[in-house]
Amino acid sequence: MKKSAVLVVDDDHDLLTAARILLKPKVSHVQVESNPENLMGHLDKMSYDLVLLDMNFKSTINTGNEGLFWLSRIKEKYPNIRVIMITAYGAVDLAVKSLKQGASDFVVKPWINEHLLATIESALTENKNQDKKVKNSLLTLDGVPDLIGQSVVMDELQYKLEKIAPTDANILILGENGTGKDLIAQAIQKRSLRANDVYVKVDVGSLTESLFESELFGYKKGAFTDAREDRQGRFEAANGGTLFLDEIGNISLQQQSKLLTVLQNRYVTPLGSHQMIPVDIRLITATNAGLKVLADENRFRKDLIYRINTVEIQVPPLRHRGHDIQLLAEHFLNVYAKKYNKRIDGFEADAIKKLFSYHFPGNVRELQYSIERAVIMADQASISGNDIFFSPIEQQPEESSFDTSIAGTNLEELERKAIKAAIDRFNGNISKAAKELGLTRAALYRRLEKYDI
């Protein structure tokens, strides 16, 4: 209940004042509205978990039809929002009718505060437990992935996950940098028959030719100069569970051949050994390269694609997810307000407009760090448009307003500064810096060499 947003719609101003005073300490955001004509506008601008809606508004005929009308409008456009009807003693029959049309409950006014709060908490709990599709893709504080979003593309993705997760089919996850492919992999494992078994992730795109075999297949003591003891490879470590190979599109043809052999034979041979060790894994792979790129046999073996791609999942870019941008922004606002011990109620209208007008080339990852920076810099109780800045490294040259004759120099300087800031922020940790910047380790190393950082 503490993290919920509630909209109260009633033409009684005294009731609205009482509701605001009662709910403000109990929920993250409470909005009151006296004109039902403005109701849908509020829902379009911000994501609400629950609406308290009066059955009757000032009109020539008070039959409760006004409340039922607005209830139907809410449920038609936002079916996951819970609605509690507010009614007078003489209109209980109409309130019961509203339950049949989608309302979660009703309260009779004048209400008892404790009863109203209990009714709201019950409706919100029902919302959390039953509306599975309200979940969508991104980080939580404890690292367990939740899928945050209500867009059509995310509903389709969620449906596909529910279908394929309980199987042992090999999954290929496709999507741009920053869309949350890693979290989709975790969500699949979490819903799979191997959910209670080991989950091992390897960024194979960052492995050199010499490290590829030793990391994935293991080695015996003395297999090479620094092999001072036996070491178990990632395939063996994931035996019985799930192995996630990230950046699969970046491995060489030679590495692909070795990987294909293991997947076909279902055993590994550690370096320096002739012993074949059987492995039982559920394989998930991911890449930011498209299928057409992978289908080029000069870059990727088709027989390996067929082996890893029993089912493919396309993670949509953030710019195709519509209202999810606000849902994700509010999620990150809650996360970072708590992290930095700041009391921030939400976003101002100009901030929401700025978020929706941006194309987010860095996808969810860029949104995440933009909101974190906004929380850090905010001086007010809400985030304004002036608090939100987008990563300079993600800007497209054609969007620049300055003279194109100096665009290259300016963009290079912006990129150099962004890279240096990321390196400093993570104390020289290349993997973490590359992840924040939306680059592979190899791409970041090339830029470090280019800018002599």
Image (cartoon, rainbow, N blue to C red):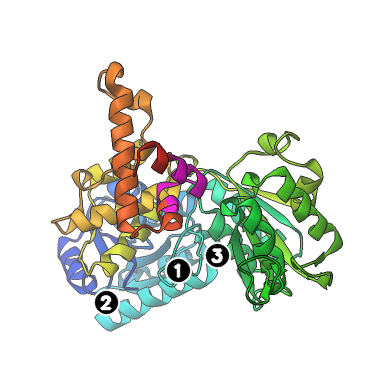
Q: Report the amino acid beneath label 1.
A: Ser
Q: Report the amino acid beneath label 3.
A: Lys
Query: Can residue 61 be spotted in the picture?
Result: no
What distance separates the C-alpha of mark 1 from that of mark 3?
Answer: 17 Å
- Which residue carries the number 3 mark? 132
Q: Residue furthest front?
A: 225
- Which residue carries the number 2 mark? 111
What distance separates the C-alpha of mark 2 from that of mark 3?
Answer: 31 Å
* N-term-proximal mark, 2 vs 3: 2
The label number, if any, that marks residue 378 in the structure image: none
Residue 40 % position (x, y): 35, 48
- Which residue carries the number 1 mark? 104
Residue 121 % position (x, y): 37, 76
- Which type of secondary structure does the marked residue at label 3 adopt? helix
Query: Can residue 271 be spotted in the picture?
Result: yes
Q: Which residue occupies 69% across, 49% down?
A: 312
Q: Which mark is nearer the camera, 2 or 3?
A: 3
Mark 1 and 3 residues: CB-CB less than 8 Å, in contact? no
The quarter of the picture where residue 217 lies is bottom right
Magenta-highlighted residues: 434-446
Mark 2 and 3 residues: CB-CB less than 8 Å, in contact? no
Q: Which of 246 and 417 is in front in this view?
A: 417
Q: Which residue occupies 24% across, 71% down?
A: 23
Q: Which of 258 and 168 is in front in this view?
A: 258
Q: Which class describes the residues within 10 Å of circle 2: few (<14), some (14-19), or many (20+)?
A: some
Q: Which of 403 and 50 is in front in this view?
A: 403
Q: Which of 189 and 58 is in front in this view?
A: 189
